[in-house]
Amino acid sequence: MELRDLIVTPIVVLLVFLAAYIIRPFVTDSINYKYYFPALSLKIFGAIMLGVIYQFYYGGGDTFAYHTHGSRHIWEAFMESSERGFELLFSNGEMHGRNWDISEKIWYFRDQKSFVIIRIATVLDLLTFSSYSGTATLFAVLSFVGGWMLFLTFYKKYPALHGWLAFSCLFIPSIVFWGSGILKDTVTLSFLCIATYCVNRLFIEWRINLRFIFLLLFSLFVIFSVKVYILMCFLAGALLWIFSKFYFRIENIALRLLAIPFVVLCVSFMGYKGISEIVEDDPRYSLNNLAETVRVTAYDIRYWTGKDAGSGYSLGELDGTFGSVARLAPAAVNVSLFRPYLWEVKNPLMLLSALESLLNFLFTLFILIKIRTKIFRYMQIPEVFFCVVFAIIFAFGVGVSTYNFGTLARYKIPLMPFYLIGLGIIYYAWKNDKKVVPLDSTE
């Protein structure tokens, strides 16, 4: 915290709320307006608290690497010369020429995926005089925009479920904390939500609009630039969502069975081609190297970058083959959705994650006990199918490749709103099916 934070941040917050007040009538109705300002306020609070905890509890961390040891230096270059600022902003990670003295101070200068966050922070720094809290507030606005667009995506289909959808998209505590500040997770989650909104408008509702096409492509590009594995999971989930919309409308059972091979073949081919194109320039995520990348990433986080965190876990041995990865799938999904358990807690932030995991488990158990085998019927709802399948794919991916609860708490936040939305719609549909309209005996 600096003096500039105390001066600039209140002004930024005031301007943000003024803009939000002007925009609110266009994005809310008489029911959901009550979630609008509380969600925005909580996001801003979470973003600022993230900085406070990283500064005074951890004594540093990624968020300061992106800002204090990242965008701040480029902002200072802009103040000296706009030409130098733009050269650094659009640098490809090579330290040379007159900008050597600045680029060597930027911790993530050579890490192009992390440098994307520094670029975004730099642009926002130009509006906030490089105030950490001011820039964090604008990251929180991005988080809120993404969360609100995800909320609207499902609210329009299930308006009676507004409370649950608002909680799932806007008020999950760990997402408010890990997904609002100056971190990769804020950016990837926000654009994942925006991409979901656009896919729904373009391919589910069939409202073709150049604005949403551009927004979808830009969102996918940002996700690809920061965390390509999120894009791979989303691509698989989105394809299944689009196909399920048409497949589950087939009422003839025989025709459905005949269509299964065609659907599987189409989704597999499109998914394979899409993922192959996405990872063409990054051999680590090619299908041939993916299992080895999972092994290296998991062991690096467990035994090197996260070794001092005291919150490591292991699901079993990874040997770089798909067989070893697939064998750990059930444990990986379990650790992402339902762990850490309460007896595994070793610090206050782990307690937050453990409580959320416990509630996830209890709600999942409640759904399974109440609905039992009928759950397969409700999985035929396209939105449920997309949300649950995407959440499970993502849970498997991050669970098997992380091996550290502290890191997992951040990495798993993209799956959480979708998982809870899917369960909520299942319960809502089941409750509606239980309602019996009494017959009028006088007729």
Image: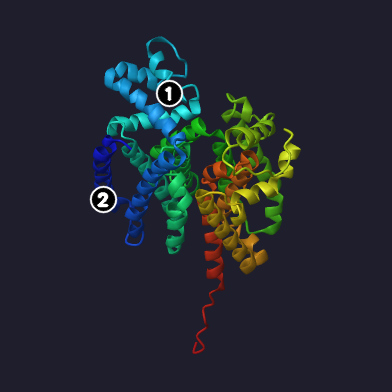
Mark 1: few/some/many CA within 10 Å (<14, 14-19, 20+): many
Q: Residue 407 at what x, y percent from top left? A: 55, 41
Question: Position of 234 compared to 163: left or right?
Answer: right
| Nearest-to-viewer mark from 1 and 2 | 1
Which residue is located at x 52 percent, y 69 percent?
432
Q: Nearer the viewer, residue 402 or 20?
A: 402
Question: Position of 55 compared to 278: left or right?
Answer: left
Looking at marks 1 and 2 on the same chain, the residue that comes earlier in the sequence is marked by: 2
Q: Nearer the viewer, residue 267 or 257?
A: 267
Q: Residue furthest bottom?
A: 442
Question: Position of 220 compared to 327: left or right?
Answer: left
Amino acid at circle 1: Ile
Q: Which residue is mark 1?
A: 106
Question: Position of 72 compared to 269: left or right?
Answer: left
Amino acid at circle 2: Tyr
Q: Which residue is mark 2?
A: 21
**Picture layout, residue 32 above or below residue 219:** below
Quick one: SS at disc 1?
A: loop
Mark 2: few/some/many CA within 10 Å (<14, 14-19, 20+): few
